[in-house]
Image (cartoon, helix red, strand yellow):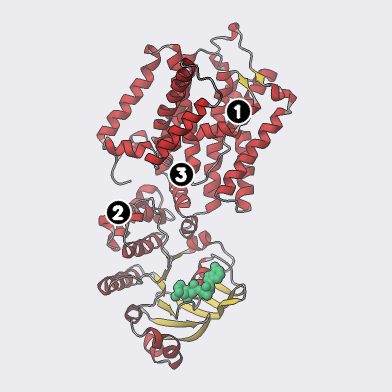
């Protein structure tokens, strides 16, 4: 079953075509990765899905319903949560409060928001830091907090924008394990932008490759990494990180 | 619900809070008329400080024109009393309603056209200035010459018309200050309060978590304006005279925000502590400058300003966070 359908979407910034006629379908339960070199338009694609701005042309549907003109808060309410590549924690609030604000979207009251937030912080290894203000966290912890906060809204689809960036290999492996758990146990579909190929290969059921805003390949991780154009434009340069 | 509020508050803090309540309740029994009048100023500043703090401290919107709501409500309730014999307990409703309506207009303009940050502050100033100039020309409420509430000895003791002595006004002000404090404490823990904090910290991130930015901001603005309006009604019947050049003036707007700034923006106790520091300081300055014959206009404002600069330079987050950690009152968890 298709959960998210992006259909021939284009987005221009002044002269620049950031996303160029891109189509993709994310099946329910999938771990879908979007890869591509810097400036390929990956984050712009996420912003389009999350409703930050509408596409110039093309449509986006979630569970069969058009969302390409919906506001970000509405899209979150429908069940799509996103993290920000450049993390945006609520700096002056505690880690716990950050997660509880995510959880209150669906929790009946604040007590249960905090209870749910606590569970999610445990899951993301942030429980011990729950009373710290978010601005005091290290970058890896802030990345985890981004995931925790988005997850707390109990999404059907989780958009992760480079949550592995800046993590050490052991931390990456741990995050891979956490995401796999979220996908399998909570049956949350994951659409992730990822440069860390080690994580992509470990997690993704399907990979979509963007270059200069346009799609150059899509397939299973093994198919994509054998694709001549992908090797030339992306993997050749970045190697297997 | 009150008991719930104290969950997670340290015993030390509870004891101090009860102590403060007892002292404040007993104060008029031991203090003279003058000191009671100073305490009225303290309570009023604490109350308006909480109202303003909801907007900046919780929702992250800087208003430099809150005198607008003070003045509007003061004039409306006074006008209704003087011209139609409608007492303040009834007059407070239309007065607050008008404040909320004007705030809604301001909010609509600001949020619709994305007027943010400094520009939002400028818009609040503009609204207050329009009211100040407008009321200069409204003959019905005395225009620039001022509007006066009759102070007749035969009315004395009519508490239902707020024609009472200082002790009555004191307890009323105390009630307002305590009520605003409790309300803010409840809000800080509520869903709405969390929405405000999220929008204050990062509107875009809040929106991505399903929070409607403008609804959150609007609710804070309306509540803050309405609460400030109640203080305006108090002000009208306490002072018995209103001048557009005073009550709508930018300096009045600044007065309203000093207590939370000195005490700590975004904290529950900041406005209270700030009020306790500032109102007496103002009185002390008046008497000192008077005693040494320094009556040059602006002396008080100058010393006040220097004091403010010293505090902001020394403790930029306000006195309360510093004091709370000194007294080890920080509560854990939420
Ligand atoms: N809001 C914006 N306004 C103008 N240009 C933008 C905006 N957002 C992105 N761009 C431009 O669009 C192009 C695609 O950017 P985008 O952030 O989507 O790339 P990306 O694939 O996420 O890259 P990275 O791997 O570096 O995160 C870039 O050239 C970028 O400068
Ligand atoms: Mg990006």
Task: Give the mark, 1 or 3, whose residue is nearer the N terminus.
Answer: 3
For label 1, the SS is helix
In the rendered view, tell whether residue B117 sits above or below residue B225. below
Q: B134 left or right of B229?
A: right
Q: B9 left or right of B299?
A: left
Task: Give the class, few, some or many, for how many residues have Cα within 10 Å of label 3's Cα (few <14, many ≥20).
Answer: many
The residue labelled by disc 2 is: A130
Gap in angstroms between the C-alphas marked 3 and 2 = 21 Å
Residue A81: x %, y % from top left: 44, 64
Q: Say if residue A64 shows up in the picture.
A: no
Q: Which chain contains the residue that carries disc 1?
A: B
Residue B59: x %, y % from top left: 49, 46
The residue labelled by disc 1 is: B247
Q: Say if residue A18 shows up in the picture.
A: yes
The residue labelled by disc 3 is: B58
Marks 2 and 3: in contact by CB < 8 Å?
A: no
For label 3, the SS is helix
Q: From the viewer's side, name the closer residue of A194 and B326.
A: B326
Q: Nearer the viewer, mark 2 or mark 1?
A: 1
Q: Is label 3's Cβ within 8 Å of ligand 1?
A: no
């Amino acid at each position: 079953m298709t959960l998210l359908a992006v259909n021939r979407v284009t987005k221009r910034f002044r002269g620049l075509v950031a996303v160029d006629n891109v189509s993709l379908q994310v099946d329910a339960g999938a771990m879908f990765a979007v890869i591509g070199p810097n400036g390929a338009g990956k984050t712009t694609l996420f912003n389009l899905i999350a409703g930050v701005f509408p596409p110039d042309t093309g449509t986006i549907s979630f569970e069969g319903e058009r969302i390409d003109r919906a506001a970000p808060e509405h899209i979150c309410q429908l069940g799509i949560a996103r993290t920000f590549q450049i993390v945006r924690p609520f700096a002056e609030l505690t880690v716990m409060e950050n997660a509880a604000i995510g959880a209150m979207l669906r929790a009946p009251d604040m007590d249960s928001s905090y209870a749910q937030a606590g569970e999610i912080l445990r899951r993301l290894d942030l429980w011990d830091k729950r009373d710290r203000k978010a601005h005091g966290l290290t970058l890896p912890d802030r990345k985890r907090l981004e995931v925790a906060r988005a997850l707390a809204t109990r999404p059907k689809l989780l958009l992760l924008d480079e949550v592995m960036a800046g993590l050490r290999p052991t931390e990456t492996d741990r995050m891979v394990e956490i995401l796999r758990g979220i996908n399998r146990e909570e049956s949350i579909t994951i659409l992730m932008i990822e440069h860390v190929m080690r994580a992509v290969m470990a997690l993704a059921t399907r990979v979509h490759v963007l270059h200069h805003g346009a799609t150059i390949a899509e397939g299973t991780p093994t198919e994509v990494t054998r694709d001549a154009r992908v090797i030339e434009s992306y993997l050749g340069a970045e190697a297997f990180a | 619900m009150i008991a719930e509020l104290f969950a997670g508050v340290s015993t030390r803090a509870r004891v101090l809070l009860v102590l403060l309540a007892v002292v404040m309740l007993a104060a008029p029994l031991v203090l003279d008329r003058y000191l009671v009048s100073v305490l009225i100023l303290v309570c009023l500043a604490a109350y308006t400080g909480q109202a303003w703090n909801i907007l900046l401290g919780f929702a992250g919107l800087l208003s430099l024109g809150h005198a607008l709501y003070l003045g509007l409500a003061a004039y409306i309730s006074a006008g209704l009393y003087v011209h139609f014999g409608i007492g303040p307990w009834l007059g407070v409703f239309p007065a607050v309603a008008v404040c909320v309506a004007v705030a809604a207009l301001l909010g609509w303009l600001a949020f619709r056209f994305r007027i943010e940050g400094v520009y939002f502050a400028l818009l609040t100033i503009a609204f207050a200035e329009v009211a100040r100039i407008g009321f200069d020309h409204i003959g019905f409420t005395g225009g620039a010459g001022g509007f006066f509430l009759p102070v007749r000895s035969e009315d004395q003791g009519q508490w239902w018309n707020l024609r009472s002595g200082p002790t009555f006004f004191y307890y009323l002000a105390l009630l307002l200050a305590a009520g605003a404090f409790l309300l803010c404490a409840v809000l800080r823990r509520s869903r709405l309060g969390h929405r405000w904090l999220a929008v204050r910290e990062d509107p875009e991130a809040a929106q991505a978590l399903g929070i409607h930015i403008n609804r959150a901001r609007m609710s804070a603005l309306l509540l803050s304006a309405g609460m400030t309006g109640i203080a305006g009604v108090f002000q009208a019947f306490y002072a018995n005279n209103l001048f557009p050049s005073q009550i709508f003036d930018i300096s009045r707007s600044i007065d309203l925000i000093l207590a939370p700034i000195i005490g700590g923006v975004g904290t529950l106790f900041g406005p209270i502590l700030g009020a306790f520091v500032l109102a007496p300081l103002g009185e002390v300055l008046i008497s000192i400058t008077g005693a040494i014959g320094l009556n040059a206009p602006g002396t008080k404002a100058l010393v006040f300003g220097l004091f403010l600069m010293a505090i902001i330079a020394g403790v930029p987050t306000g006195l309360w966070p510093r004091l709370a950690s000194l007294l080890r009152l920080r509560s854990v968890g939420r």
